[in-house]
Image (cartoon, rainbow, N blue to C red):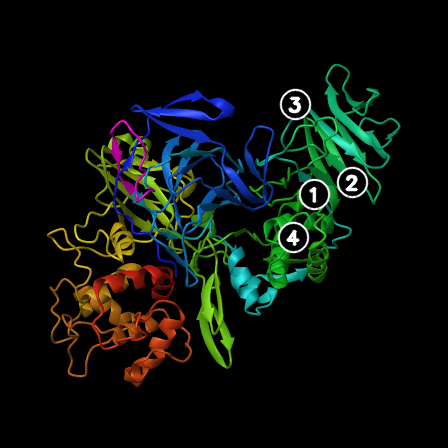
């Protein structure tokens, strides 16, 4: 568990700048008489992204990572994501803030957390590091512009690091920042790729992984990977093949070219050629770019380039051709160029299914991952292709199988010598298998991470009918270990000494500038709060209400409905709240029920400040009427169950007078009823609940272990372990092993001490996602 920097609640300041070109390409940003130097960032490492001719950092696989060095903690990294672009994640010690929203994209500001406050990762304190890790992920079915732009550093030398707001030089306008807590990444429908990896690391076979994520489907061998042909459209990130005026290709061996209008095929030697179309005479013009400049003409509306079996066609695809440069993609099999109605050309690669999968699997899932995770990915990818008839057009259906993040990433010939043999074996071991449902290939969609909740295809995509194997449900796998069945969340588990946590399992790094919210929906006036009105079975938000000083707006997805009481609000409907609303949400799995900017008077500088602010901002925990939180005050049993229920999304239940000391009109009656019904706490033998009694750390450990169904922990090493009663010992061990509870610096646990409100806030912060899954 990392300890995040306390958010000091400072306000973000709106930057109003004038840019002038400085020496060496740097720019001077002038704001209110102050100067801020902007510059190109120092990129330490890049994996899965490349810089195209337009200077955009573009994905060439499902997930890319950049490590960027900042000159100091006060520097701010700026990045712009286009509309329908990828999602972003930043490393623990940084916060990602939506700074501005425009029709064509979102501008983010990435801030280091405040100086002098260490982070905690795997028990090791880290200080003095100024390298941010930026993860970029394309979302299947949504990302059609897989790139980021305007990556730059705003260097505020001598200024303090960010402490919750933007901390920019400004004209004096201020804007609070709203932190959005949530989990998962993408549409969350079907298989979680990180979940598949988590299960594989525990020894779960690929067929069991697929049965878990697509229940009711059957794995069948239906295709011959060597004989089944696939046609892939080169879409350059889009939904359909990208038309161009010309294409430049490289032949590494003599190859044949033929048109569909008849005539004798021509054979061209190895070299570099430009392919264009002459609309006047209806012929393809092939120009030798190797020096001779000779041209050949081939009649027809389709040109096929057939290479020898041991060769490939190089294509300058994402980068422009320059004399002496190397092609950025290599394609085996045949390349097909087709004339469009406006006399441009689209490009298509035709090749055997097995070779196609070699260009898909290691770009959809890291080749270093466990073999059975890769096997599950292979079958899902093969099934996805089969569902689209392998891209083969028919007389009745124009099947489309593109190479982009919108569908399945395909990068042509795979040449990584370290993993090529492993990927080939994974494909061979799955033997042409696909997932079948009702006699047809299943809709084997997948996303990076689901945050512990699988979304239905109706809520995720707007499908008219729900598939029986794509229902909304918690992602819990029942694992057999030493004769015991242990429920785990595949993306985030702790079994014995084995631990696994997906980097995007839950996210707290996304924040919105309140100014950005107001710009998006100006009719609300000054922002006040966001209320979650409706959720799907997979816990995705279906409708929300944004309240402001002058109005409100209800935002619904395709299946949402305006609830009673919101008639006065403006209504806005999107296909997907997460993507179309344009505010950078990674998924619709948002924790909490009411999001706001918290204002508590007595927590600034407290060791639990950030956890308290986070939970208060999401409506999970509340302060007192006088505006205080009183973090060191002991927690009562009534407050404890209320906090656990709110964190887990458990609604109050009807109270029927079960306990002598709880009345039906007590504020906590419904919370007590819900907690008892959930089974994680109970009353006393004398028929009381004792709601005002202070809850001890031992009692808290027992209740939490039950609520989250924690697996057994190891032996306890606390100095006072013998003082922990037998009825609490296993629960304390489980909660400690899972990282939710810890001891004191002197090596004691102090189980009989009362738990404080601050301690409970940090525990819930750590356990939030697991509570959501298991309490529901």
- Using residue 10 as the reference point, say whether residue 88 is left or right of it: right
**For the residues carrying marks 2 and 3, which lies nearer the camera in this image?**
2
Q: Residues within 10 Å of mark 3 (few under 14, many from 20)?
A: few
Q: CA distance from mark 1 to mark 2?
A: 9 Å
Considering only vertical position in the picture, is 602 above or below 20?
below
Dot 2 and dot 4 residues touching (CB under 8 Å): no
Location of residue 684 in the rendering, given as x and y in whole percent from the top left corner: 19, 80
What numbered label is drawn on residue 534?
none
Residue 648 in sight in this render: no
Question: Mark 4, residues whose alpha carbon is within 10 Å: few (<14), some, or many (≥20)?
Answer: many
Q: Nearer the viewer, mark 3 or mark 1?
A: 1
Q: Which residue is mark 3?
A: 341
Instruction: Report the residue at 51% width, 52% height from top.
Output: 448
Q: Is residue 155 magenta?
A: no
Return the residue at label 2.
Answer: 312
Magenta highlight: main SS: loop
Of circles 1 and 4, the one toward us is: 1
- Residue 162 in the magenta stretch? The answer is yes
Nearer mark to the viewer, of 2 and 4: 2
From mark 1 to mark 4, how far is it between C-alphas? 15 Å
Describe the element under mark 4 as helix, strand or loop. Answer: helix
Quarter of the figure that contains the N terminus: bottom left
The residue carrying mark 1 is: 412
The quadrant where residue 236 appears: top right
Write down the quadrant of residue 173 in the picture.
top left
Kindly check if marks 1 and 2 are in contact, taking CB atoms under 8 A apart as contact. yes
Location of mark 4 (residue)? 382
Q: Nearer the viewer, residue 273 or 228?
A: 273
Tally of numbered tags: 4
Magenta segment: 161-177
């Amino acid at each position: 568990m990392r300890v995040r920097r306390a958010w000091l609640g400072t306000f973000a300041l709106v930057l109003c700048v004038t840019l002038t070109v400085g020496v060496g390409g740097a720019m001077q940003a002038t704001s209110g008489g102050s100067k801020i130097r902007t510059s190109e960032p120092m990129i330490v490492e890049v994996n899965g992204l490349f810089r195209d001719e337009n200077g955009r950092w573009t994905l060439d696989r499902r997930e890319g990572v950049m490590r960027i060095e900042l000159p100091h903690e006060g520097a701010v990294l700026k990045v712009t994501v286009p509309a329908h672009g990828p999602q972003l994640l930043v490393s623990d010690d940084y916060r990602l803030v939506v700074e501005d929203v425009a029709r064509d994209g979102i501008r983010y500001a990435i801030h280091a957390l405040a100086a002098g406050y260490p982070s905690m990762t795997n028990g090791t304190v880290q200080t003095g590091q100024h390298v941010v890790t930026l993860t970029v992920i394309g979302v299947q079915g949504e990302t059609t512009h897989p790139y980021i732009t305007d990556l730059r550093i705003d260097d505020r030398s001598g200024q303090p690091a960010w402490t919750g707001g933007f901390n920019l030089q400004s004209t004096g306008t201020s804007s609070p920042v709203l932190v959005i807590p949530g989990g998962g990444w993408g549409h969350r429908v079907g298989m979680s790729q990180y979940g598949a990896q988590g299960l594989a690391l525990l020894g779960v076979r690929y067929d069991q992984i697929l049965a878990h994520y697509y229940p009711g489907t059957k794995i069948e061998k239906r295709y011959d990977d060597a004989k089944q042909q696939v046609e892939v459209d080169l879409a350059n990130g889009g939904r359909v093949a990208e038309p161009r005026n010309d294409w430049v290709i490289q032949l590494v061996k003599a190859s044949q070219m033929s048109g569909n209008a008849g005539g004798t095929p021509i054979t061209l030697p190895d070299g570099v050629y430009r392919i264009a179309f002459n609309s006047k005479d209806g012929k393809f013009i092939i120009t030798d770019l190797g020096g001779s400049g000779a041209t050949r003409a081939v009649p027809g509306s389709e040109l096929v380039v057939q290479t020898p079996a041991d060769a490939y066609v190089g294509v300058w695809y994402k980068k422009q051709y320059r004399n002496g440069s190397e092609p950025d993609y290599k394609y085996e099999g045949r390349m097909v160029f087709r004339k469009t109605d406006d006399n441009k050309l689209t490009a298509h690669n035709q090749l055997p299914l097995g070779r196609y999968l070699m260009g898909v699997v290691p770009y959809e899932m890291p080749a270093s991952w466990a073999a059975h995770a890769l096997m599950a990915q292979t079958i899902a990818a093969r099934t996805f292709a089969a569902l689209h008839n392998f891209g083969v057009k028919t007389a009745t259906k124009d099947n489309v199988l593109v190479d982009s993040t919108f569908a399945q990433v395909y990068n042509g010939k795979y040449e990584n010598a370290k993993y090529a043999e492993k990927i080939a074996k994974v494909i061979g071991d799955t033997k042409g298998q696909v997932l079948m449902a009702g006699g047809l290939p299943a809709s084997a969609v997948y996303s990076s991470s689901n945050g512990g909740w699988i979304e239905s295809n109706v809520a995720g995509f707007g499908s008219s009918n729900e598939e029986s194997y794509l229902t909304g449900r918690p992602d819990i796998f029942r694992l057999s270990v030493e004769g015991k069945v242990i429920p785990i969340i595949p993306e985030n588990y702790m079994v014995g000494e084995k631990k696994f946590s997906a980097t995007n399992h839950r996210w707290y790094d996304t924040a919105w500038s309140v100014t950005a919210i107001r710009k998006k929906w100006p009719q609300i006036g000054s922002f006040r709060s966001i209320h979650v009105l409706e959720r799907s079975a997979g816990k995705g938000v279906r409708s929300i209400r944004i309240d402001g000083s002058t109005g409100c707006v209800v935002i619904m997805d395709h299946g949402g409905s305006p609830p009673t009481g919101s008639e006065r609000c403006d209504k806005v409907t999107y296909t997907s709240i997460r993507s179309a609303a344009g505010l950078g949400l990674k998924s619709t799995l948002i924790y909490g029920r009411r999001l706001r900017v918290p204002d508590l008077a007595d927590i600034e500088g407290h060791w639990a400040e950030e956890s308290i602010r986070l939970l208060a901002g999401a409506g999970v925990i509340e302060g007192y009427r006088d505006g205080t939180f009183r973090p060191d005050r002991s927690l009562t049993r009534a407050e404890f169950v209320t906090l656990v229920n709110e964190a887990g999304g458990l609604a109050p239940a009807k109270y029927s007078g079960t306990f002598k000391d709880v009345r039906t009109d007590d504020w906590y009656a419904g919370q007590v009823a819900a907690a008892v019904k959930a089974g994680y706490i109970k009353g006393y033998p004398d028929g009381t609940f004792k709601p005002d009694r202070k809850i001890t750390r031992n009692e808290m450990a027992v209740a939490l272990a039950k609520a989250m169904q924690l697996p057994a922990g190891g032996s306890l090493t606390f100095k006072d372990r013998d003082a922990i009663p037998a009825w609490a010992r296993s629960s304390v061990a489980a909660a400690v092993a899972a990282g939710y509870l810890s001891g004191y610096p002197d090596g004691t646990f102090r189980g009989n001490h009362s738990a404080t409100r601050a301690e409970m806030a940090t525990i819930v912060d750590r356990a939030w996602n697991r509570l959501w899954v298991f309490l529901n």
